[in-house]
Amino acid sequence: MPQSMLKSVTGPADWRAQFPALQGQMNGRPLAFLDSAASAQKPQAVLDKVMGTLSGYYANIHRGLYEYSQRTTAEFEAVRGKMAKFLNAKSQNEIVFTSNSTDAINLVAHAWGLHYLHADDEVILTEMEHHAGIVPWHLLRDLTGIVIKYIPVTQEGELDLSKLESLLTKKTRLVSFVHISNALGTVNPAEQIVAQVRAYNPDIKILIDGSQSAVHMPVDVQKLGCDWFVCTGHKLYGPTGVGVLWGRGETLLKMPPYKGGGDMIERVTLQGIKYREPPQRFEAGTPPIVEVIGLGAAIDFMESIGWDAITAHEHALSEQLFKRLSARKDLRIIGTSPNRAGIVSFLMHGAASADVGMILDKCGVAVRTGHHCCQPLLGVFGIEGTIRASLALYSNESDIDSLEEALDKAGKMLA
Amino acid sequence: MGDLLPFSEIKDTFLFLEDWEARYAFLIDLGRKLRPYPEERRDDAHKVPGCTSQVWMAHSWQGDRLTIITDSDAHLVKGLLAILVALYSGKTADEIKAVPVEAAFAELGLEGHLSPNRRNGFFAVASRIEALAAAHT
């Protein structure tokens, strides 16, 4: 059995030391990694778990009677339990492994939407959605003739919930919204939105895209009161290729399969097929075995630190990032809601974001430039893209110092 | 052609400069020297889809030679476009097909900018020029 490399972690500097990729350099400069909203770095414990599984006892799951397969199966299924606890689901059978958040939303759009939505049924999204929260419903609209409406976004970068009431009708079947905006950092009042929708009609289904929230705040799906919650492993310090769909037990039971294949059937005859119960019904074919097990190690890592310590550190650092960037005369901040996570989008006056991004790269500062897969949202601000700095539990003040120094340099070079 | 330094001179100057700041400043300068882009062609038909910057490209054939005019709202991207113009503009279709664009950028240490990863429209311009040459018989 491989020794876990997870040391007793006591403070943010120790947490950071657990991430080998952060110790490296970029373009000969110490790395300031400020693109965790796109994908987070991985701690040593995850790397060890992935390598340990592959080199130690790897085998396909749910099939073999031999020891390797049984052990891999047990570890894989244990992560289902960990994710259930992480999201406070009622049962681990409410946890479906997908390949990412996008895949999870597509699963709901197909397995539920294609079956239960018909022409003229209405779906309410928001202008703040990532394209993954929009495009699956457009595809469904082309197939079924549903109507898509959007909750507008204010110039502060908040959902204009005063408009929600007028969007809800007798035909509304689904409300789907992003928990934390990946482009602006705005934290949406999820419980308030759910309460307002439920008060209008408790039968309306609600999906929450938690791609950004699951990593920055404790999520309690029972308290949120939604029907589906999606998140993705690679933003949770885990491997790529694994995502999670949480669905309310009774809702999942009423959903037919999305993809067909092995491991999702009870019995196949030439006349008909009996499908397995959820979650296996939605997990056709060999799943991302090692990635799921690696995600389990990432959850263990986060829990070894604890939400209190993570949120205290991230909150203080987010506030510092926002205040320091807001104080600069050369920037325009896009999204100024006080309800925010560690994501700040901005433009530099008189400079194209691509130029700034390329100069920051040379200074060892990794940020995202572009539309962040949120073109409708940026349209609200009349812009094509932004520069986005985003934090994670391993971020520190010196990352923000490096960002500011690099911005100074970019300002001079592009003047 | 004729509105820019030839590629060989761009390369000599670029490699003479010692650090990335001087090289980027030179790129920005190259971009500024590009022939002004005609406003009537700043439309969707001439916009090259990209992710992180806006890029426009217009072309015309003067006999069998291709003239490229291009623009971007980003200075560095415009400088990179100027290198493409130096490599391709004023050439025949056959000459364009023979341009070792990847090797040329590698000589400047700028090959990363040709990767699709950059998604800045710049890669798409190179592809578009190659497609124009391929379609020109």
Image (tube, coloured by chain):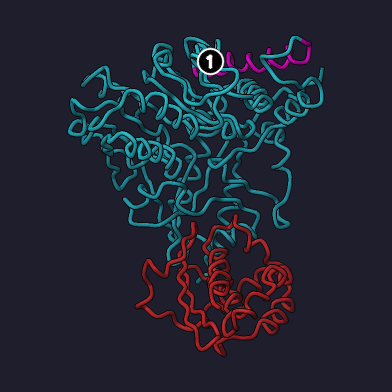
In x, y percent, where is residue A225? 36, 18
Where does the N terminus of chain B fall, quadrant-wise? Answer: bottom right
Which residue appears farthest toward the front when viewing the image?
Answer: A270
Residue A39 as seen in the image, left or right of residue A335: right
| Residue A205 found in image quarter | top left
Whether residue A76 appears in magenta in the rendering, the answer is yes
Above/below status of A386 relative to B106: above
Identified at 27% across, 34% down, the residue is A146
Identified at 48% across, 42% down, the residue is A343
**Magenta segment, principal secondary structure?**
helix
Whether residue A333 appears in magenta in the rendering, the answer is no
Q: Which element carries disc 1, helix, strand or loop?
A: loop
In x, y percent, where is residue A373? 45, 47
* Residue segment shown in magenta: A66-87
Identified at 30% across, 48% down, the residue is A155
Which chain contains the residue that carries disc 1?
Answer: A
Q: What letter labels the chain drawn in red?
A: B
Q: Is residue A323 visible?
A: no
Identified at 33% across, 56% down, the residue is A382
Residue B136 as seen in the image, left or right of residue A155: right
| Residue B135 found in image quarter | bottom right
Q: Nearer the viewer, residue A307 or B120?
A: B120
Residue A14 as seen in the image, left or right of residue A89: right
In x, y percent, where is residue A194? 31, 23
Q: What's the colour of chain A in the image?
A: cyan
Q: Is residue B25 visible?
A: yes
Q: Which residue is mark 1?
A: A270
* Mark 1 crowdedness (10 Å alpha carbons): few <14, some 14-19, many ≥20: few
